[in-house]
Image: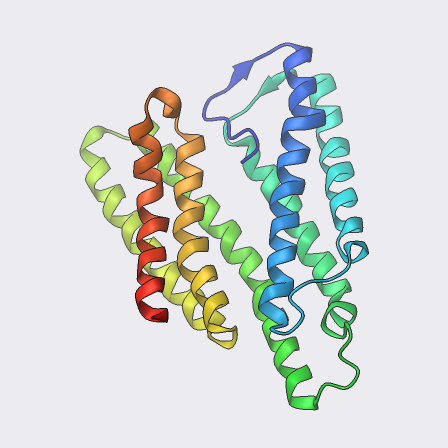
Amino acid sequence: MGDLTLVEDQCDYGRFAVWHLFTNPISEVTIQWCYITLLFACVDDKLPWRPFYYYLPLVVIIYVLQVLFWLPIILTHVKTFEYQAIVSFFLSDATTYIYMKAMQSRIVGFRGEDDPEDLKELKNVRYNVFANIVWLRFGAVCVYAAYLYGILKLPDQTITGLNILLAFATVLLRVVVQRQTSVFHRDMNFYMTFLGLYGGSAMYFAFAVPGFEAGAANYISAAIGPLTSLVSWAFISS
């Protein structure tokens, strides 16, 4: 998740250096590496992998970009600001999107010289769908951030309304993602729609809300959504 700061915080160079060189860039690299690996499985049913040199440049680019972007800010402004991780997310997602577009022909065409034309077209359609979901995912992160901001800043009387809006937005996003990923294999469609969406939102709130580590019940609560989706998938597949 990186450092999803909910409030401004004055800190020393040591803490900021750790965040700048390790916590933030490694978190972003891990997220995007998992995402690009998931791309391979969604595009190609028979070869759901690619050699490491297909994604190694992306990993290096994201790490260097995150370090260089935050370096002048850290040197001149030793202070976190609200929701600074949104900026990191945007940089990483934009970089991944551009990289995916630049590598599309190589990733889609990997060991596919003898594929029929309809299969090549299907792979390209799947690839473009997955690339567009990058921005849907970023939009979901922004919605979750706005929800947390509302809880912290708005009167208590509005919390119920915020919960209803968030539930509606989550269902709407699930419908959109499920419709777009219908071109994927059934298992990958389920993963992207249910486990990816509800698991991602559970992880977001688990690590963004202060005091989460207070008890094991919070972990169980965060796991309810993904586990419910997993049970549903088991019934559908049986």
Residue 220 or residue 11, whichever sits in front = 220
Tell me the quarter of the image containing the C terminus.
bottom left
| Horizontal arrangement in the rendering, residue 209 relative to residue 59 (left or right) | left
Picture coordinates of residue 8, whole percent (x, y): 50, 19
Residue 223 location, quadrant:
top left
Residue 153 location, quadrant:
top left
Total marks placed: 0
Residue 84 or residue 236, whichever sits in front = 236
Query: Which residue sits at x=67%, y=41%?
Result: 29
Picture coordinates of residue 177, whole percent (x, y): 44, 65
Residue 97 or residue 46, whichever sits in front = 46
**Placement of 164 over or under 207, stated as above or below:** below
Q: Is residue 39 visible?
A: yes
Query: Which residue sits at x=27%, y=42%?
Result: 162
**Placement of 163 over or under 6, stated as above or below:** below
Q: How is the image coloured?
A: rainbow
Query: Which residue sits at x=42%, y=61%?
Result: 193
Picture coordinates of residue 27, whole percent (x, y): 62, 36
Residue 29 or residue 79, whichever sits in front = 29
Query: Which residue sits at x=64%, y=74%?
Result: 46
Picture coordinates of residue 182, whole percent (x, y): 46, 74
Residue sitting farthest toward the top = 12
